[in-house]
Image (cartoon, rainbow, N blue to C red):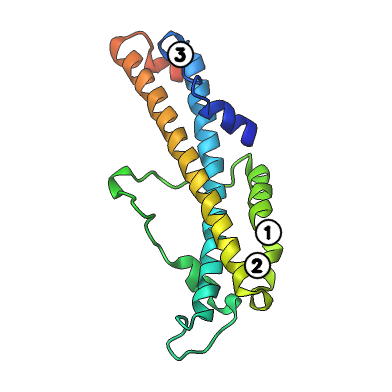
Amino acid sequence: MGRQQLQRILADDYLDGLTDWSTADLRTARADCEAEEEAVSYARRLMQGRLDILRDELQQRDGAGDADGEVTDVLARLASVLSVDRPAPGSSPLQARATRLRVPAAAADYEEEVDQVVGGDFLEDLHHRPTSALAEAVERLAAHEHELSQARRGLFDRIDRLRDELARRYKDGSAAVSDLFGGA
């Protein structure tokens, strides 16, 4: 899986001839898209966690941290930094998707990719890093997170189109729900 699978699925021609596909191919493609979406979502969560940590460190340096002005170590603040539940800018609760809480099969590929943007070692010694380096890391992470968000939207589009085609087939009788239980 990983980037090659993602690029293959997001290619403009991926769903060409969808109505001519076999039902088994539709189900396989849907499962592939769902697995890749899970991996991309996992990578986004890793990025968002790193972004939250870096942004909090920048806030601490700007004096917007603790009410008493005391700068505390990021480890002491980590639980509160990562527990803040902020909706994505421009997101709609009506378009929300369920969050899966397992580590996807392609996790290692995506963890490596996230580390290439801003590695875990960068986060280990934040208080000794220049503010400009933190700001640059935030920019890199935010840009990559945006790219992953776009990919995720593309994956959801493909998943929805595959599900719609399957539903159409079940409704018109060209596919049987019982096939799901018979190993088809």
Quadrant of residue 46 within the rendered picture: bottom right
Amino acid type of the residue tagged 1 in the rendering: Gly
Q: Is residue 60 visible?
A: yes
Foreground mark, 3 or 1, reads 1
Indicate left or right for 166 with 58 as reference.
Answer: left
Residue 72 at x, y percent in the picture: 56, 84
Residue 124 at x, y percent in the picture: 68, 70
Residue 161 at x, y percent in the picture: 39, 24
Say which mark, if any, is on residue 119.
Answer: 1
The Cα atoms of the two marked residues, 3 and 1, are separated by 42 Å
Say which mark, if any, is on residue 123.
Answer: 2
Q: Are marks 2 and 1 in contact (CB under 8 Å)?
A: yes
| Quadrant of the drawing holding the N terminus | top right
Q: Is residue 1 visible?
A: no
The Cα atoms of the two marked residues, 2 and 3, are separated by 47 Å
Residue 154 at x, y percent in the picture: 45, 34
The residue drawn where x is 51% and y is 57% is 48
In the structure shown, which secondary structural element does the residue marked by tag 2 occupy? helix
Toward the front, the furthest residue is: 132
Quadrant of residue 7 within the rendered picture: top right
Quick one: label 2 or label 3, which is nearer the N terminus? 3
Quadrant of residue 39 within the rendered picture: top right
Say which mark, if any, is on residue 57.
Answer: none
